[in-house]
Image (cartoon, rainbow, N blue to C red):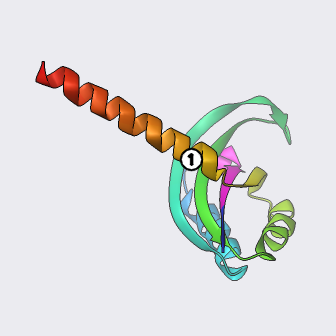
Amino acid sequence: MKEYELTVLIHPDLEADIEKPLAKVRDIVKNAGGEIVNEDNWGKKKLAYKINKEDFAVYVYFDVKLPAEAPLKISNTLNITEEVLRYLLVTVDEKGRALLAEDQKRAAKAESEEDKE
């Protein structure tokens, strides 16, 4: 299974009961044979431009592992899901992720050395 990043913009009117649309997105991923590794709700944010006459959306980010045929199934289903304004499903850049982890380790090491002084 390959790793992907899924960012979903959910209709802002559903913010009060966000668990229902999130459960629907989780079911879509699981029914396609995928597994959710991590989930992060970024909250309600202003959009750069209007989408379906909406100025705001609730951003939710998922790290998912999917089999080869799953991205197409998920894309087709999310396209017709009313709660989802937009989504972005991309493969994980392993080199970029490794460089980011290396930078974080270097920063943590530099911080700990400063604390010792």
Image location of residue 89, percent across then percent down:
75, 56
Number of numbered labels in the structure image: 1
- Which residue is nearer to you in this view: 117 or 2? 117
Quarter of the view holding residue 68: bottom right
Instruction: Judge whether 72 appears above or below 114 on screen.
Output: below
User: Residue 59, image x and y in percent?
Assistant: 63, 45
Q: Residue at x 81, y 77 (%)?
A: 69
| Magenta stretch, residue numbers | 4-15
For the residue pair 26 and 97, the one nearer the viewer reads as 97
Location of the C terminus (image quadrant): top left
87 vs 97, nearest the viewer: 97
Say whether residue 105 is left or right of residue 34: left
- Give how far across and how far down residue 32 sits, in percent: 73, 79
Which percent across, then down, holds residue 45?
A: 62, 34
- Quadrant holding the N terminus: bottom right
- Figure quadrant of residue 106: top left
Decide whether residue 95 is among the magenta residues: no
Label 1 crowding class (10 Å Cα cut-off): few <14, some 14-19, many 20+?
few
Query: Which residue is tagged 1?
Result: 97
- Residue occupying image coordinates x 59% and y 69%: 23
**Residue found 53% across the figure and 49% down from its top:** 41
Q: Secondary structure at mark 1?
A: helix
In the image, taking residue 98 as reference, residue 82 lies left or right, namely: right
Check the image and report above or below for 46 versus 35: above
| Residue most extreme to the left | 116
Does 5 appear in magenta? yes
Query: As drawn, is 63 to the left or to the right of 9?
Result: left
Badge 1 amino acid: Arg
